[in-house]
């Protein structure tokens, strides 16, 4: 039995979706805003997320981005926004499909089933919270603790750490890091990596000169070791 997380702030629609989905054999969890959606995703690990973009506390795009920081769960957007740019933004952020309101329920169910079928088996790295020695990196809430104390990171420092932690134990090339953190126009700006890796080590490592977690592979890239 597949588990769907329905994220919509319209109580009537969320209730109707829940009834239909349960009648079709789904386990259903609901959330009416982005914060509850992220918490529910981290707690329940649904098989698919059905997400409205118009939420009261944050953009649905922000919810997609936050989920993609730590999980590959399929995300099907259900939105009244029919403009092409909204669809492009959602898909670029990491959504797997986009359904516009009004919709046919049988089509929506088919799209949810297809999204679950396409999803790869969960990998060992799909964890919202990663513990590495004295460090606790909460990918869902975008925060890091060192010996239980929160470490303040700049947005760029966090983005670099996030990419490394999501790929922990694997080499992340310099080009990949630059493109994911700074964008495709920065693939040759390797000095950025030296500056920001040094800043992260000063904040996160016990001995920045001999890092345990943020390890450089000379001429290739970086590895986050847990």
Image (tube, helix red, strand yellow):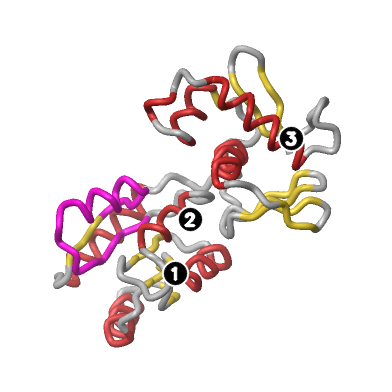
Tell me the SS state at disc 1. helix
Local crowd at mark 2 within 10 Å, few (<14), some, or many (≥20)? some
**Stretch of the chain drawn in magenta:** 75-97
Mark 3 to mark 1 CA distance (whole Å): 32 Å
Task: Say if mark 2 contacts mark 1, CB within 8 Å.
Answer: yes
The image quarter in which residue 220 lies:
top right
Looking at the image, is 27 positioned above or below residue 99?
Answer: below
Q: Position of residue 72 (x, y in %)?
A: 45, 49
Q: Which residue is mark 2?
A: 66
Which label number is shown at residue 203? none
Q: Residue furthest top?
A: 219
Mark 2 to mark 1 CA distance (whole Å): 10 Å
Q: Position of residue 100 (x, y in %)?
A: 18, 64
Q: Does residue 95 appear left or right of residue 223 in this picture?
A: left
Looking at the image, is 193 positioned above or below residue 165?
Answer: above
Q: Position of residue 56 (x, y in %)?
A: 38, 76
Q: Which residue is mark 1?
A: 34
Q: Quadrant of the C terminus?
A: top right
Q: Would you say residue 85 sits in the magenta stretch?
A: yes
Q: Is residue 28 visible?
A: no
The image quarter in which residue 16 lies:
bottom left
Q: Residue at x 46, y 18 (%)?
A: 188
Q: Which residue is mark 3?
A: 201
Local crowd at mark 3 within 10 Å, few (<14), some, or many (≥20)? some
Looking at the image, is 122 positioned above or below residue 12?
Answer: above
Q: Residue at x 75, y 42 (%)?
A: 203
Q: Quadrant of the N terminus?
A: bottom left
Looking at the image, is 220 positioned above or below residue 119?
Answer: above
Q: Is residue 122 visible?
A: yes
Report the mark closest to the observer, 2 or 3.
3
């Amino acid at each position: 039995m597949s588990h769907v997380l329905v994220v919509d702030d319209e109580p009537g629609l969320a209730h109707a979706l829940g009834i239909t989905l349960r009648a079709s054999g789904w386990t259903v969890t609901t959330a009416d805003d982005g914060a509850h959606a992220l918490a529910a995703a981290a707690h329940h690990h649904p098989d698919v997320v059905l997400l409205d973009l118009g939420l009261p506390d944050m953009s649905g795009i922000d919810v997609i981005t936050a989920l993609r920081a730590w999980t590959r769960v399929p995300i099907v957007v259900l939105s009244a926004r029919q403009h092409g740019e909204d669809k492009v933004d959602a898909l670029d952020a990491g959504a797997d499909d986009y359904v516009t309101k009004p919709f046919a329920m049988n089509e929506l169910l088919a799209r949810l089933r297809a999204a679950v079928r396409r999803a790869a088996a969960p990998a060992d790295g799909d964890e919202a919270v990663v513990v590495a020695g004295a460090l606790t990196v909460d990918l869902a809430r975008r925060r890091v603790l060192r010996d239980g104390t929160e470490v303040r990171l700049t947005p760029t420092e966090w983005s670099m750490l996030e990419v490394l932690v999501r790929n922990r134990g694997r080499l992340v090339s310099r080009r990949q890091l630059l493109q994911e953190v700074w964008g495709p126009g920065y693939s040759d700006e390797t000095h950025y990596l030296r500056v920001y890796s040094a800043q992260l080590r000063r904040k996160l490592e016990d001995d920045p000169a001999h890092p345990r977690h943020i390890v450089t592979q000379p001429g290739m890239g970086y590895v986050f070791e847990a």
